[in-house]
Image: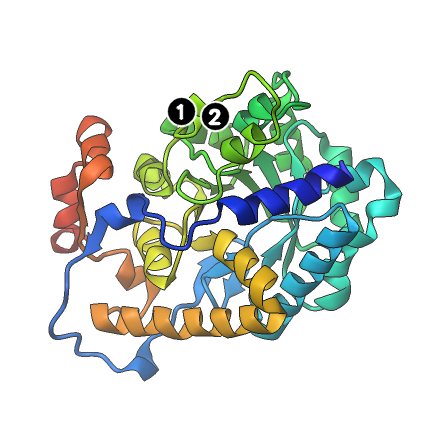
Amino acid sequence: MESRKDQHVRLFEKTYQTHQTNDFDSVRFVHNSLPELSLSKVDSLTTLPFGTWSSPFFINGMTGGSEKTKKINESLAHAAAATGIAIASGSQKAALKDPALHDTFRVLRQVNPNGFIFANIGAELDEEAAKQAIDMLDANGLQVHLNASQEVVMPEGDRDFSSWLKNLERIAHSIDLPVVVKEVGFGMSRATFRRLIDAGVQIIDVAGKGGTNFITIENQRRDRARFDYLQDWGQSTVISMLEAQPYLDQATFFASGGVRHPLDALKGLALGARAIGVSGIFLHTALSSGSEGLITLIEEWKQQMNEIMLLLGCASLDELRRTDLILSGTPDQWARLRGPKPEEMATRSQRIS
């Protein structure tokens, strides 16, 4: 397990692409030549079922479980503490099996004593494991990740997913903290949203295709019977948020996966997400420039998000969610087959009061 965690980080850096394209490029705002707004009036705070965050993006779950990844978590936690944004742990399964690894995750709380921290487990674990993971970090909330695609390609991965939905239902009803059910980079569909909501899940992170690809990473760990043909598996974050449109008033959605810069984050928020999870670029920055480099980047994101909102004439995220969005490429094709109609997205400011 320890070796696998380090392999994941090494293969992430090997496959990380600074200028990769994804479906966020197929979503465009309509330029507003008369914003009629001052930057001092722009506020990007986001209201969530459990409170308010001053910034609508957070450091999403990534790593832990080895001495090398402990240092990474320390760097990420230092940046979260310095900038006041939330942070999620990587999967704590290894530490639940081996108490000697607890400190590789506890460092998140030790370095960031007052911050908002999500614990993290997989859906194969039950509510007792969830409580142990939360206690390990004195966490403010819990992420439960869905990684069937990764497990299938992982050489030593699980092949039995039959208990997942029942575990999620029990966790949702027994944990008295915010519970976020998230993918690990392959997106979600309407059918998945319906089943999660019926099970009592109130917060969903669509975590779509477009960023770190765990099929690619696990495939490189295989000696034979490779799954190269599955590297384009899943739905993008943009498509997942289009799938979420009928359910925006029934659950709170987070968007993550392939978020490269503040403009991508604002597109995710405009599509209805209440918060944006960021992993790849933050991990790459922490590895290459340390916590101080990541702090600088996060502060730049905060400033630039407000400045782009100013350009759009939006003083709040509620106003951002009423802006017109132009779809092209695969998202446009997907929406024409499954909705919402691209024409409605392009003219929604005329109908939303």
Query: Residue 195 in the image: x percent, y percent?
Result: 47, 26
Residue where numbered disc 2 is placed: 195
Q: Are marks 2 and 1 in contact (CB under 8 Å)?
A: yes
Identity of the amino acid at label 2?
Arg
Q: Residue at x 61, y 29 (%)?
A: 169
Quadrant that contains the N terminus: top right
- When asked about the image quadrant of residue 163, the answer is top right
What kind of colouring is applied to the model shown? rainbow
Coordinates of residue 300 in the picture (x, y in percent) = 43, 73
Q: Is residue 198 left or right of residue 309?
A: right
Residue type (three-letter) at the residue carrying disc 1:
Ala
Residue drawn at x 16%, y 55% as measured from the top left: 349
| Residue at which label 1 appears | 191
Nearer-the-camera pick, 312 or 316: 312
**Is residue 127 at all visible to an observer of this figure?**
yes
SS under mark 2: helix
Q: Is residue 252 above or below residue 114?
A: above
Q: Does residue 50 appear to the left or right of 56 in the view shown?
A: right
